[in-house]
Image (tube, rainbow, N blue to C red):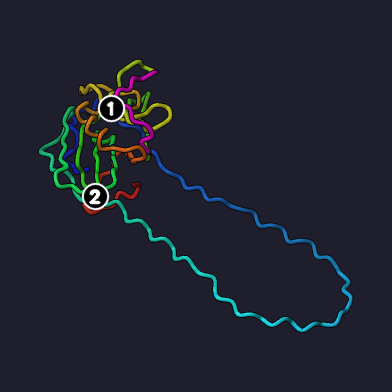
Amino acid sequence: MASSKTILATLGLLLPAAAAGMVAIAAHRAPLAPPSPKALRIKAVPRLAPPPRTAQAPAPTTPPAASPSPYVVRRILDVPGVMKIGDTYWDEAGVPPGAIVITVDLDAQVLSIFRGGYEIGTAAILYGGDDKPTPLGIFPVTQKDADHVSNLYDAPMPYMMRLTNDGISIHGSEMEAGLMTHGCVGVPVDFARRLFRATRLGDKVIVTNGERLAIGRPITAA
């Protein structure tokens, strides 16, 4: 995110979640032991002339699939000043159709939605406290419910977009400095409505703790 979107230090009541890393695990296979040699007695037989070989056309080869183009940041909204809890901006004028990617930076306390690499909306967020931290990682949107009510806390979660099976989601929320969630990402209800309408099932949400994006840089996790 642009530094102009960094939340005022006075909002430091929201505790950042711990950073997380990713570990790649390679599969290893032990080599198979060679079979034990066996002495064989072979009766001599007259050799036969080999049959004539028939020329065969070479097997067709399939060219490797081209790598998909990286999802590159093409525009960041020009937000005046710094953002504070409750602030939102939305501008999709002239932005062509494209893939949707949502980024959440817990350190900056900001959510952004990109379409085809163009940032079309951004908002200051609430997120989970130390006892219920918001998880880091890449999550597809698996469920959408405009009128969802939490069955754990009996609380309304308007325009809910589920990220994990244990209930972590993005949803509309009351916005006030010092408030925290039970791990969800809370945004103003009007912004949540726009986010809900712009997003489809399967769209990716990338949650980080301090990653900054810049124009021309690829979102490699997308």
Give, as a single range, the part of the protein colored magenta.
Answer: 140-151
Q: Residue 177: image x %, image y %?
A: 20, 23
Quarter residue 146 falls in: top left
Q: Of the residues shown, which amino acid type is indicated by label 1? A: Tyr
Front residue of this view, candidates 85 and 155:
155
Q: Which mark is residue 34?
A: none
Q: Secondary structure at mark 1?
A: strand
Q: Residues within 10 Å of mark 2 (few under 14, many from 20)?
A: some
Q: In the rendered structure, which disc, 1 or 2, sits on the residue that comes first in sequence?
A: 2
Q: Residue 120: image x %, image y %?
A: 19, 41
Q: Is residue 131 magenta?
A: no
Residue occupying the point 33% across, 39% down: 205
Q: Which residue is disc 2 drawn over? A: 73
Q: Nearer the viewer, mark 1 or mark 2?
A: 1
Q: Are marks 1 and 2 in contact (CB under 8 Å)?
A: no
Front residue of this view, candidates 99 and 212:
99
Q: Is 27 on the left-hand or right-hand side of 170?
A: right
The secondary structure that most of the magenta stretch takes on is strand
Residue occupying the point 69% across, 57% down: 32
Q: Of the residues shown, which amino acid type is indicated by label 2? A: Val
